[in-house]
């Protein structure tokens, strides 16, 4: 058997020109990003929590508190409705972050008195019953006003906050990466996806555009035919790429 020589397909190589489509790439026009006034003194931003508050500001937490109180009232839990606060929601988020690297087989084990499961940080931050109520009643939208055009309308506020804050505080580089990210979930849900070969095979798929250093620029959850992204008539892959680029308002090139 004669081994055929490998011929490079030069027609598929990208070249730079003033055209915006096809296999021609325009010259990078430079980042049109300018520093904005930070909500706190830049010299004070020294901890991870300071950076977290840039991307998850108190205005977002206030909306969560408002909708959580509304839902607790609808469920006739007036006692919890009266005590929900920004600090309580922040503390519950901190406990969730901690469970990401200090795992237990059951959530209630963090409040046990056994030496192998007891976690002093969790116990001091919040009682077990209060945390259960936070998990039960936390909402991000008014359930009485559903938006059936968006399958992720209940959490759309979170994605909008992420995209808006990323547009403010993440500089737009010349090179970006666009791919599929998975949010792990094993329960029943019509939008749950299975992606073979991914570290997380089951869960919700999110289209993500990030910098080469891993900073998120924009993202959109995948909701099938109702995914909240414009159709440009170029197929799913190119539509996703162009849609994320338009949403982040990236400079040419």
Image (cartoon, rainbow, N blue to C red):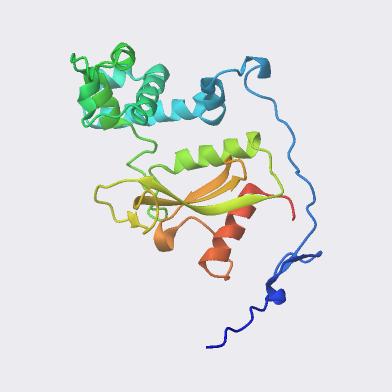
Residue 209 or 59: which is nearer the viewer? 209
Q: Residue at x 33, y 41 (%)?
A: 143
Q: Identify the residue at the far front of this view.
A: 1
Residue 184 position, x and y percent, is 35, 45
**In the image: residue 199, left or right of residue 82:** right
Q: Quadrant of the C terminus?
A: bottom right
Residue 56 position, x and y percent, is 51, 29
Q: Residue at x 63, y 53 (%)?
A: 245
Q: Identify the residue at the far bottom of this view.
A: 1
Q: Is residue 54 above or below residue 234?
A: above
Residue 31 visible in the displayed image: yes
Q: Is residue 121 above or below residue 8?
A: above
Residue 54 or 1: which is nearer the viewer? 1
Quarter of the image where one finds residue 135: top left
Residue 144 position, x and y percent, is 32, 42
Residue 187 or 231: which is nearer the viewer? 187
Count of residue discs: 0
Q: Residue at x 55, y 19 (%)?
A: 47
Residue 14 position, x and y percent, is 72, 66
Q: Is residue 187 above or below residue 18?
A: above
Residue 6 or 40: which is nearer the viewer? 6
Residue 231 visible in the displayed image: no
Quarter of the image where one finds residue 130: top left
């Amino acid at each position: 058997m004669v081994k055929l020589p490998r011929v490079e397909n030069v027609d598929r190589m990208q070249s730079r020109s003033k055209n915006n489509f096809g296999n021609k790439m325009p010259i990078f026009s430079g980042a049109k990003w300018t520093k904005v006034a930070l909500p706190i003194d830049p010299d004070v931003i020294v901890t991870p929590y300071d950076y977290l508050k840039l991307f998850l500001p108190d205005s977002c937490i206030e909306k969560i508190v408002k909708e959580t109180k509304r839902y607790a009232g609808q469920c006739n839990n007036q006692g919890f409705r009266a005590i929900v606060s920004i600090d309580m929601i922040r503390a519950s988020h901190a406990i969730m972050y901690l469970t990401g690297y200090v795992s237990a087989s059951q959530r209630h084990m963090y409040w046990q008195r056994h030496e192998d499961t007891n976690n002093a940080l969790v116990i001091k931050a919040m009682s077990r019953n209060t945390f259960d109520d936070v998990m039960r009643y936390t909402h991000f939208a008014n359930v009485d006003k559903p938006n059936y055009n968006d399958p992720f309308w209940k959490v759309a506020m979170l994605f909008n906050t992420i995209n808006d804050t990323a547009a403010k505080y993440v500089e737009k580089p010349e090179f970006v990466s666009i791919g599929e990210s998975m949010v792990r979930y094993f329960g029943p849900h019509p939008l749950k996806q299975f992606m073979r070969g991914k570290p997380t095979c089951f869960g919700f798929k999110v289209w993500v555009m990030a910098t080469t250093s891993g900073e998120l620029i924009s993202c959109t959850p995948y909701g099938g035919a109702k995914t909240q992204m414009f159709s440009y008539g170029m197929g799913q892959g190119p539509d996703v790429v162009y849609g994320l680029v338009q949403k982040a308002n990236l400079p040419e090139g």
